[in-house]
Image (cartoon, grey):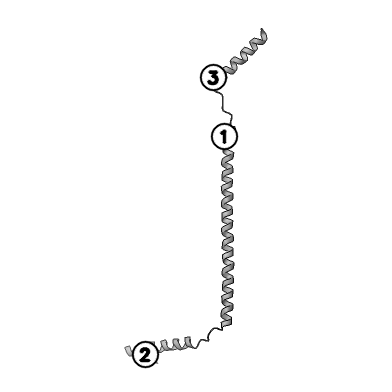
Amino acid sequence: MKPLKDTFQDRVGRAAEAKQKALDKLKAKPEIDPQVAAERQAARLAKEAKQAEARAAKQAERERLAVEKEAAAKAKEDAAQAKEAAKVVPPTQAELKAARDAKYAARKGRKS
């Protein structure tokens, strides 16, 4: 059982021992086999390439959708302009009076 009162030296000693134990454990770890490291790197590169391809496909899809959206907006705008141009402008009062007078004159011409 450890004593009730630790001195500073005791604590520093235990800290040094723990540090040395961790260092020994790290040094005891076996080195990575170069073949295994190469396999891991190849797998990582393949994964990164696949992710880059997916990102590129996603970006292309976004761009395609943006172009389609822009084309749809342009078509809608063109349709609205065509509809506006096709609207029949109501005749003015002077035009209505001229048409009435022409009908009256034609009717008078047939009767005489």
Q: Mark 3 sits on what residue? A: 94
Q: Mark 1 sits on what residue? A: 84
In space, the residues marked 1 and 2 are separated at their CA atoms by 91 Å
Whether tag 1 and tag 2 are in contact, CB under 8 A, the answer is no
Which label is found at residue 50?
none
**Identity of the amino acid at label 1?**
Glu
In the displayed structure, 33 sits above or below 110; it is below
**Identity of the amino acid at label 3?**
Ala
Q: Residue at x 38, y 91 (%)?
A: 2
Q: Earlier in the sequence, mark 1 or mark 3?
A: 1
Mark 1 surroundings: few (<14), some (14-19) or many (≥20) residues within 10 A: few
In the displayed structure, 91 sits above or below 105; it is below
**Identity of the amino acid at label 2?**
Gly
Under circle 1, the secondary element is helix
Q: Residue at x 62, y 15 (%)?
A: 103
Camera-near label (3 vs 2) is 3
Quadrant position of the N terminus in the picture: bottom left
Q: Earlier in the sequence, mark 3 or mark 2?
A: 2
Under circle 3, the secondary element is helix
Q: Residue at x 35, y 88 (%)?
A: 12
In space, the residues marked 1 and 3 are separated at their CA atoms by 23 Å
Q: Residue at x 57, y 20 (%)?
A: 96
Q: Position of residue 46 (x, y in %)?
A: 59, 71
In the displayed structure, 63 sits above or below 99; it is below
Q: Mark 2 sits on what residue? A: 13
Under circle 2, the secondary element is helix
Q: Position of residue 112 (x, y in %)?
A: 66, 7
